[in-house]
Image (tube, helix red, strand yellow):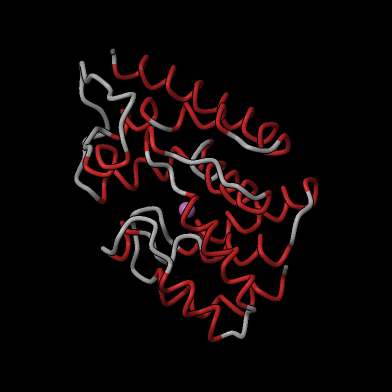
Amino acid sequence: MNDWLKETLPFLTEVFAGDFSGHDLEHTLRVYHLAAAIWEKEGGDGEIVALAALLHDVDDYKLTGGPMGGTSRAEAFMAEQGVSLDKIKAVTKIIAEISFKGRDTVTPTTLEGKIVQDADRLDAIGAVGIARTFAYGGSKGRPLYIRGESYALDMTAEEYAKHESSSLGHFYEKLLKLKGLMNTETARQLAAARHQFMEDFLAELSAECFF
Ligand code: NI
């Protein structure tokens, strides 16, 4: 798996330069390492897991302004690197299936896809998930919390993309659900401690903010 980390690094550094929305290079590197750890226990094609993890956000609509589920940058990069057509297809399918889209979220069809989706979701929870949530909210000019806010718990992909909530709302609308949505047993185990950490954080926050 390590070869692809080295091969993609210059491309990834360029793609994510100047991003402060939480979809930066470090997020991609964490997803890669998490995916590698899950893959070691769960198996599958390591090259497909590595490429999908490393390239999963290069076409993100929040970053490129392009369509949801697009894969053109990832595809072009792999073609340039001489990746076989079969592998390009497998990787782009994973990237297209990976995102959380409210009620329209899909379960990836392959083991490799399940591993990378789990890795991406693990990086959205725990201490790093808390940090990313408030950084993203700040980049969008959203408040930390809104007193008495009501949460939209069941949204379609389109509603989810347009929806504006406080950073705290994001925990209830997405992050606290992720533990129950893990595809693999290895990720479920990793998610348990991260989920508990968020629960403890939310209890402390509500005490400190006099909710
Ligand atoms: Ni991601």
- Residue 6 vertical position relative to residue 199 in the rendered view, above or below: below
Is 71 displayed left or right of 167 in the figure? right
Q: Nearer the viewer, residue 121 or 30?
A: 121
Residue 43 position in % (x across, y down): 79, 51
The percent coordinates of residue 98 (x first, y second) are 50, 50
- Rendering coords of residue 210 (x, y %): 28, 13
Up-down relation of residue 46 to residue 139 (above or below): below
Residue at 61%, 67% in the rendered image: 51
Please tell me in which quadrant of the rendered image residue 61 appears: bottom left
Q: Tell me if 111 is positioned left or right of 26 in this view.
A: right
Near-viewer residue (169 or 118):
118
Which of the 4 quarters of the picture holds residue 47? bottom right
**Quadrant location of the C terminus?**
top left
| Residue 192, x across and y down, in percent | 63, 28
Q: Quadrant of the N terminus?
A: bottom right
Q: Residue at x 56, y 29 (%)?
A: 179
Q: Quadrant of residue 102?
A: top left
Residue situated in front as seen by the camera: 83 or 164: 83
Which residue lies at the image location 51% right of the left edge and 37% below the top edge? 125
Looking at the image, residue 116 sits to the left or right of residue 171; the answer is: right
Q: Is residue 174 above or below residue 62?
A: above
Count of marks overlaid on the render: 0
